Amino acid sequence: MRLETAAFQGERGAFSEEAARRLLGRRVNVLPCQRFEELFRNLTEKKVQAAVVPIENTLAGSVHENYDHLLHHDLPIVAETSVRIVHNLIAPPGVPFRNIRRVFSHPVALNQCLNFFSSHPRVERISFYDTAGSVKMIMEEKPSDGAAIASELAAKIYGAHILKRGIEDDRQNFTRFFLLEPAGAKPRTIRGAGKRPWKTSLVFSIRNIPGALFRSLGALALRDINLVKIESRPLRGKPWEYLFYLDLWGHREDKVVRNALNHLGELADFLRVLGSYRAA
C-alpha cells in the first residue's frame, strides 16, 4: 500500500513532523515546506494528501498566520493533536558542553530557554529561521563552539548529540496542531481518537453594532454549548472590523450544534465551519 505524504512547515525534525507522526503514524512520508503559504498551496493543489499546521502554543499564543490561511483555503480540519515541546541543547558529536559559546535556534525557542542562558552567561543566543534547521546547519558546518536548541527527533535525523535535555523554562509548554485535508477527502480514522469528544471550529463575522457579539454567542449559550476558545482577527478590507474564530464542544451534525449554527448563521454576515474533529 502506498504511504501518503503530509506537508509541514520547517526542516525535517521540526515539532510539526512529530505531530504528523502522531496523527498519521511513524511511517508517514513528509514534505518539509519553507513557509506556511507553500504548505497550504501544496495541499490545495493535491501535491500531498494531508498537512499539519501549528495553531497555538500554551506560552507563545496563537499562530495568527494559520488562522488567516484557514479562512482563505477550503481545507477542512479533520484531527488535532497536542505535542509537549521539549527543548534540547544539541551539538555535533565530539563537541563538549564546555566548548559551547554560541547557541542557534528559532527566536521563540530561545526565549523559552532564558533560565538556561541566565545560568550560562558565556553562551550567546543567535536567532535562526528554524529549530530543526539550526541542527541541520551545525551538522553541516561543524562549528567547534556552536550548538542548537531543537527536538530529540531533529538530533536523531541529523546524527547530532544531545548535550542537555529539557532546558525549557516551563514544562507546561505544549503546541496544538491541526491535521488538514482537501475538501471531499474520504474520512479517515485517527488511531486512539474514537473515545475522545468532538470539537468543531468555525469562523464568522458580524456587523459592528451594539450587542451583535453578545447575541451571536447567545446562540451557543442558550443551548448549553461549551465554547472552548474565541479568537478575533482583523477583517481585511474593512478597517476596525473583525472575524471571530471559535472552538466549541460537539459535532456540526449534532442536533443541538446544528441548530446553534443555523441560529448563528441568521445573525452573522459570514459563517463557515472549518471542521469537526476528535479532541486531542
Image (cartoon, rainbow, N blue to C red):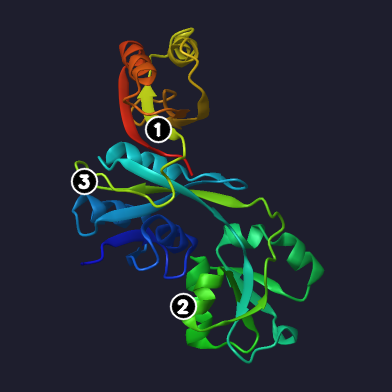
Label 3 is placed on what type of residue? Lys
Would you say 66 lies left or right of 47 here?
right
Label of residue 186 in the image? 3
Q: Position of residue 253 (x, y in %)?
A: 31, 25
- Helix, strand or loop at mark 1: strand
Q: Position of residue 236 (x, y in %)?
A: 35, 31
Mark 3 Cα shell of 10 Å, populated few (<14), some (14-19), many (≥20): few
The residue lying at 35 percent from left, 23 percent from top is 254
Label of residue 157 in the image? 2
Task: Tell me whether circle 1 and circle 2 mark residues in contact (CB < 8 Å).
Answer: no
Asked if residue 78 is positioned above or below residue 162 in the image, the reply reads above
Label 2 is placed on what type of residue? Ile
- Helix, strand or loop at mark 2: helix
Which is more foreground, mark 3 or mark 2? 3
Outermost residue toward the front in this view: 195
Can you identify the residue that label 1 sits on?
A: 201
